[in-house]
Image (cartoon, grey):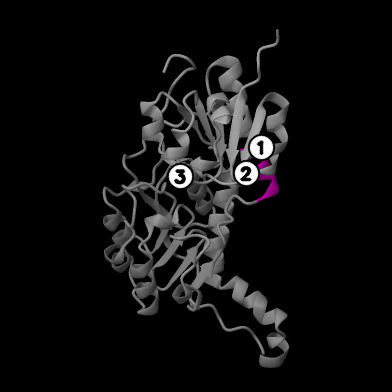
Amino acid sequence: MAHPRPTVIVPGKMSQRVLDRLPESFELVWLASSDPALVTQDVAERVSAIAVQGALPTELMDAFPKLEIIANFGVGYDGVDAGHAASRGIVVTNTPDVLNDEVADTAVGLLLNTLRRLPVAEQYLRQGRWVKDGAFPLSPLTLRGRSVGLYGLGRIGLAIARRLEAFGVSIAYHSRSRRDDVEYIHYPTLKALAEAVDTLVVIVPGTESTRATVNGEVLSALGKNGVLINVGRGSTVDENDLIAALQNGVIAAAGLDVFENEPHVPEALMALENVSLLPHVASASEATRNAMGNLVVDNLIAWFSKGEALTPVPETPFERNKG
């Protein structure tokens, strides 16, 4: 008698690559949303894995008594309560490394867009204003001579730093601990970093410890020539403080790929001319998203075939049936 294939549930939206590959190795159950009320008793008893993109309510996690693994689509997993999963012996995986280069490329592009106002210049051309009004106004900001501080120097932060080295800017960073494998200057606090640089790139996870840490005090320390770039999580920046800083000239400009209440972006931000805004697209290339989807599925396959996930998050370093 053949051993039954594990059942994986997918609540709500999910990468098409994941949906295409899961049926090759698993029984797939799709839910219209993350509402625990949609889970029937039969499904609850069968499910041993969840593949999730976005938030996973703890109530939904707890709807499955035989749950072993949660495969999260994305390097950030703040939508999954990893601590609660750990208390149940459930492994949580994410998709690191495969998106490092794409996000780093986007961060540098967003920085250039913000400093040189390239999207605005393109619209100027497309609207016929080059012919009608003459040359596009000189950009008041430049990357030349800037000092860049990275808030976070993990895999993606390091990839951003390596790219910025080629631009001849000075680089420093703030993180929970000093790295021994880089020569960049480490600052023990975020405020100290902001005081030392004029460009702050945010690439930390969206956790309670990072929530609203980029606030009015930090922005004031960055200074009137300061530029903020955020490709991490919107929750890290106090949006009200940022809007006030941009409106009042406390800092010069900002480039944002992430926001506090996505997909809703404050009208006050969109009304400002000294910001460059992207709809959370840092890793949004087909190649990178497919690689992320593959890693979601490969984590599930490795767990059920070899008893060990490929990329478990630090909170859940479990092996199968060992907790």
Q: Which residue is mark 3?
A: 79
Q: CA distance from mark 3 to mark 1?
A: 18 Å
Q: Give SS at disc 1.
A: helix
Instruction: Judge whether residue 287 is colored magenta.
Output: yes
Q: Amino acid at mark 3?
A: Gly
Q: Amino acid at mark 1?
A: Val
Q: Which residue is mark 2?
A: 14
At 49% across and 23% down in the image, what residue appears? 66
- Looking at the image, do the residues carrying marks 2 and 3 touch, with CB atoms under 8 Å apart? no
Asked whether residue 128 is in view, the answer is yes
Instruction: Judge whether residue 125 is colored magenta.
Output: no
Magenta span: predominant SS is helix
116 up-or-down from 99: above or below: below
Q: Earlier in the sequence, mark 2 or mark 3?
A: 2
Q: Quadrant of residue 138?
A: bottom right
217 up-or-down from 247: above or below: above
Q: Give SS at disc 2.
A: loop
- Looking at the rendered image, the quarter that the N terminus falls into is top right
Q: What stretch of residues is rendered in magenta?
A: 285-292
Q: Position of residue 221 (x, y in %)?
A: 29, 65
285 up-or-down from 270: above or below: above
- Looking at the image, do the residues carrying marks 3 and 1 touch, with CB atoms under 8 Å apart? no
- Judge by depth and name the residue closer to the eye, 276 or 159: 276
Q: Earlier in the sequence, mark 3 or mark 1?
A: 1
Label number found at residue 160: none
Dot 1: few (<14), some (14–19), or many (≥20) neighbours within 10 Å?
Answer: many
- Judge by depth and name the residue closer to the eye, 161 or 30: 30
Q: Which residue is mark 1?
A: 18
- Looking at the image, do the residues carrying marks 1 and 2 touch, with CB atoms under 8 Å apart? yes
